[in-house]
Image (cartoon, helix red, strand yellow):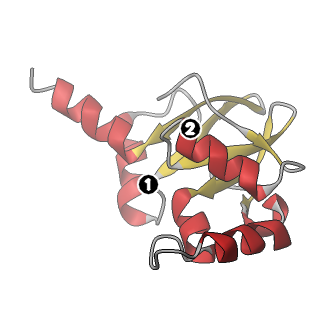
Amino acid sequence: MTKTVVTANEKDDLKTVVEKLKKNTIRHIPIVKGKEVIGIISRTDINRLTFGALFEGQEGADEAILDMLTVSQVMTSKPRTVSSDMIIRDLAEIFTKEDFHALPVVDDGQLQGIVTTTDVIKYLLEQYD
C-alpha cells in the first residue's frame, strides 16, 4: 500500500481534484472529512464527465462541467475500505470479483493508506525475485 496518500476534501472544487490527480500522477483520490474516508474519485470518474480524452480543443467545455458539479456529486460515497492487516489473497479476490482498482486502507476509522491493483501486482512480482 501507499502510506502517503494524496487526499481531497468534500469542499474542494473538482478542478482542485483534477489538478491533484495530474500533479501527483495518480488515478484515485480518497475524499476525507478529517481523517475519515467519506468517498473516492477516480481519474475514470473525471474522464466520464469531460470531453478532453475524446476531443481536442474541448478544454472550455471541460472547465464548465467541472465548475457545475461538486466533489460530493462525483465521488463514490462510502467506498469499500480494507484494513492494513488484510492478506494479499483476500485483497486480490476483492479486486478480481468487484469493480475496484483502488481501496482506501482504514484502521480505527482513520485513513492509513491506499492499495491499488498495481500494488498487488508489484507485490506478487517481488515474490518471484
Rendered residue at 64%/41% (across/down): 20
Please determine whether, in this image, residue 24 is positioned above or below residue 66: above
Q: Where does the image place residue 78, in percent across and percent down from the top left?
A: 75, 56
- Between 9 and 114, which is closer to the camera in this rendering? 9
In this view, which residue lies farthest toward the left? 129
Binning the other alpha carbons within 10 Å of mark 2 as few (below 14), some (14 to 19) or many (20 upward) gives few
In this view, which residue lies farthest toward the front? 57
Residue behind mark 1: 94
Circle 1: element type: helix
Residue behind mark 2: 23
Residue 23 falls in which quadrant of the image?
top right
Q: Which label is found at residue 126?
A: none
Circle 2: element type: helix
Q: Mark 2 or 1, which is nearer the eye?
A: 2
Instruction: Identify the amino acid type marked 2.
Output: Lys
8 displayed left or right of 123 = right
Looking at the image, tell me whether mark 2 or mark 1 is earlier in sequence order: 2
Rendered residue at 27%/40% (across/down): 121
Image quadrant containing the C terminus = top left
